[in-house]
Image: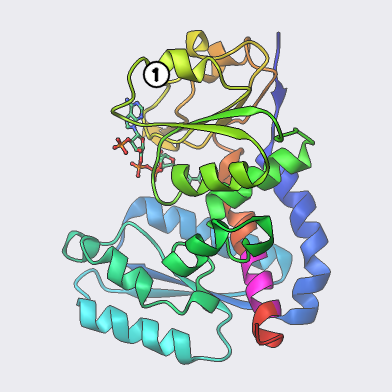
Amino acid sequence: MSALLLSGREAAAAILADLKPKIAHLDPKLVVVQVGDDPGSSSYILQKMKSCAEVGMRSEHRHLPKAVTLEELLAEIDRLNADADVTGFIIQLPLPAHLQSHVPSIIRAIDPKKDVDGFGAYNLGKMFLSTEFEHLPPATPAGIVMLLEHFEIPVAGKHAVIVGRSNIVGKPLSMMLLNRDATVSVCHSKTKQLASITKQGDILIAAVGKPGMITADMVKRGAVVIDVGTNRVGGKLVGDVDFDGVQDVASAITPVPGGVGPMTVCSLIKNCVQAKQRQLAKI
Ligand SMILES: NC(=O)c1ccc[n+]([C@@H]2O[C@H](COP(=O)([O-])OP(=O)(O)OC[C@H]3O[C@@H](n4cnc5c(N)ncnc54)[C@H](OP(=O)(O)O)[C@@H]3O)[C@@H](O)[C@H]2O)c1
């Protein structure tokens, strides 16, 4: 079997083309705050700025020095919260070591109406209610859901197995798939007999950060495989899925790069549009 390639580049281009008229009309603005010079962050931010430019959305990259204090960063967040011209902003993670333990309070300081990364408790909590309340969902899980929709992959009644339970990918994705009537299993580093669970997945999502850890023998024949992992190996970007082996077993699979990555950027832009609409409607 040779699997259908679920191109995030293709899906994102189609979704962004649909959003373009709304962007022209609403004129939202995204600000990305970077602290320090993490090379991974710099390349993700470049991609975000590029995608915003392509779709005609205003964006600004605010670069703060690595040694910025917590108080200075919180003051910057207050300024962004108060600036009516800024629709949404994100604090690019990871932060330098001296700020890393403060991430929860840094995220809490962001006005939930401008939290376009959807990482704050308010937006995560709303997601628990139903699809109707997914107003600013976290970008990567929302991107995965949009990818499945774009390729008309049914979710209702399917067994979705997620490997990884982070607050930005695995956990919120489990809720979004549950909201769409999937039966969801979430695996993590303490899960016993991982392969026996992954092999049950009609949809298998890997969000671990371990290059090639999902091998063909862990995948149900005909499964849809979504690879969230982005790992640098010898200067090359690789996923958590052993693509070459798994594509022979799966019915559909995302590439890395060009799979989930472009969808994450796409849903960030979609969240900015959604945030602007809700700000104008004062809801
Ligand atoms: N393409 C994109 O847009 C995008 C966006 C976000 C993240 N990513 C990538 O996705 C990957 C995951 O990111 P993340 O932020 O979710 O990572 P994370 O916070 O490090 O979480 C990793 C998860 O994997 C689990 N895990 C680790 N080893 C495991 C094992 N041997 N078996 C089963 N589960 C295991 C961990 O379990 P415990 O909870 O028990 O520790 C944890 O839940 C990374 O490569 C990241 O770069 C890509």
Q: Quadrant of residue 149?
A: top right
Q: Please, which residue is most extreme toward the front here?
A: 129
Residue under label 1: 194
Q: Residue at x 67, y 79 (%)?
A: 278
Left or right: where 5 falls relative to 203 = right
Position of 59 relative to 250 (above/below): below
Confirm if mark 1 falls within 8 A of ligand 1.
Answer: yes
Q: Residue at x 45, y 62 (%)?
A: 119
> Of residues 60 and 5, which is closer to you in this image?
5
Q: Are there few (<14), some (14-19), or many (20+) residues within 10 Å of tag 1?
A: some
Q: Which residues are magenta?
A: 270-277
Scheme of image coloration? rainbow
Q: Quadrant of the C terminus?
A: bottom right
Position of 173 relative to 79 (above/below): above
Per the image, is 273 magenta? yes
Name the amino acid, label 1: Leu
Q: Quadrant of the N terminus?
A: top right
SS at circle 1: helix
Q: Position of residue 66 (x, y in %)?
A: 23, 68
> Of residues 50 and 255, which is closer to you in this image?
255
Q: Position of residue 212 (x, y in %)?
A: 43, 21
Specify the principal SS of the magenta part.
helix
Q: Position of residue 214 (x, y in %)?
A: 45, 20
- Ligand 1 sits in quadrant: top left
Left or right: where 153 falls relative to 196 = right
